[in-house]
Image (cartoon, rainbow, N blue to C red):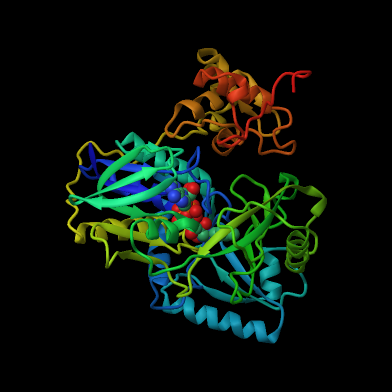
Amino acid sequence: MIYDVAIVGAGVIGGMLARELSRYDLKICLLEKENDVAMGASKANSGIIHGGYDPVPGTRKAKLNTEGVELLFAVAQALSVPCKRNGSMVCAFSKEEESVLEALHQQGKENNIPGLAVLSGDDARKLEPNLSQAVTKVLHVPNAGIISPYELTVAAVGNAMDNGVVLKRNFPVSAICRKDAAFAVTATSGETVRAKYLVNCAGGYADKVAQLAGDDFFTIIPRAGEYMLLDKAEGRRVGHTLFQCPTEEGKGILVSPTVHGNLLVGPTATKTETPDSKDTTREGLAQVEQLAAKSVPSVNFRQVITSFTGIRASEKSGDFILKASEKVPGLVHAAAIDSPGLTCCVSIARYLTALLGEQGLSLEAKESWNGTREDPCAFQKLTDEEKDAYIKRNPAYGKIVCRCETVSEGEILQAIRTNPGARDIDSVKRRTRSGMGRCQGGFCGPYVMALISRELGIPMEQVTKNGGKSYMLQGRVGEV
Ligand SMILES: Cc1cc2nc3c(=O)[nH]c(=O)nc-3n(C[C@H](O)[C@H](O)[C@H](O)COP(=O)(O)OP(=O)(O)OC[C@H]3O[C@@H](n4cnc5c(N)ncnc54)[C@H](O)[C@@H]3O)c2cc1C
């Protein structure tokens, strides 16, 4: 069988493109090297829907950011993905930084961002009482928001699959060759997929995938960002997302609520050699704490429940690379999608679809396409009486597995059975929040393992934390 389009990489860009293309009468295949979707930058980022004042006017980033904000809010609603328009503030602490705010304000106007205003420190503190007294002015960005990036990716891929897209996990693309007007895309296992068009959405590895296909005009420069996530006890410390003035390295350290009611602080910006490093460092986290406290001195860092690192996939031009290959017919790159790539995921998916159309891909709309998705958290939103009636019909929803986040067995089974089904402990966590709370899975982990083992029909010894050889059990006590 020859697919019309194969997409390499099931991050938010590959996932959203798969969903967008699933509107049309096409055979589409999404190839991912890991055991789940959203395993790269789309899993570990700030989750901010950026207002659009930051990209340089006239760039592709600026245009796609301006278009992308409302498109993303609309798609998130259609896919029942948690998001909120909480607004953001960029804080100035000195006269020099106030002039940076003015420049950002002007840039935002040129990018057509609605509602921007520079407020005095005192006016900002009326909206954000915990904001530092040292803040002299802020740029208020009311159209900005927050979203759960991995739930968005899961939902986009799930919706694409519901509309006919094939997802192949554990498919690390290791060879690409073009013959008879089609690509043969081969994984390390030897399995090969054939497709007429190939889209490179491989994030930090996009330059390597381009090279496999015979293209080499860009190099990804990975930059690590370290974060700390705080317990929900700190979640109301701020309502807006609070940025400091951006630098060459990025948008600066932020303090932000998350859609699930935690507090997020970070990220740093340091060069790294490894596009999928997950390491945090003592120095990086100390820097996060110090700079976050500059914006909000009252943050209680004793409430940190976890820390993590995300890797930005940047390129020297500073702009997104959304381009048909000049060397290889049928190959399209979506590379160097660093921030605000999450905000732009829908606008990028539409841009790429049009680009594929220009390359000759036939885009005939499918009547059967359904762009909506059932809310995986629907049970959580019921009233107590409704929950009671639901549990009588589905007793698994009455068994609480994760006590920190109140997640039932029914919701975990639903996550395993719904596209793209969870296959390991971390993918259950990303879909249901089981293991996301204060105890970080200490209590619910074994129960989740048992459910995965039962549902997938595999022994407990084969259940992994996040695919590969990350087995949860090493053997029986006394035998190891
Ligand atoms: C620290 C940080 C903070 C950020 N904050 C924000 C923010 O607040 N707002 C915002 O709008 N944007 C933000 N971004 C940017 C945003 O996260 C990215 O633009 C977006 O996630 C990129 O998605 P992607 O699909 O291109 O890449 P990824 O999510 O990295 O996906 C690439 C996928 O390709 C797979 N892959 C790689 N090689 C192969 C191969 N050979 N074969 C098969 N599969 C392969 C990977 O496993 C991965 O799943 C941030 C990024 C970082 C790192």
Asked whether 372 or 16 is in front, the reply is: 16
Q: Position of residue 290 (x, y in %)?
A: 78, 66
Compared with 199, 322 (above or below) is below
Asked whether 122 or 432 is in front, the reply is: 432
The structure residue drawn at horizontal position 63% and vertical position 19%, both measured from the top left corner, is 399
The structure residue drawn at horizontal position 57% and vertical position 55%, both measured from the top left corner, is 45
Compared with 23, 250 (above or below) is below
Left or right of 295 in this view: 272: left
The structure residue drawn at horizontal position 35% and vertical position 60%, both measured from the top left corner, is 333
Quadrant (top left, top right, bottom left, bottom right) of the C terminus? top right
* Residue 418 image-quadrant placement: top left
Asked whether 388 or 353 is in front, the reply is: 353
Left or right of 356 in this view: 62: right
Compared with 415, 150 (above or below) is below
Quadrant (top left, top right, bottom left, bottom right) of the N terminus? top left
Q: Would residue 168 be seen by someone viewing this image from the given angle?
A: yes
Left or right of 120 in this view: 421: left
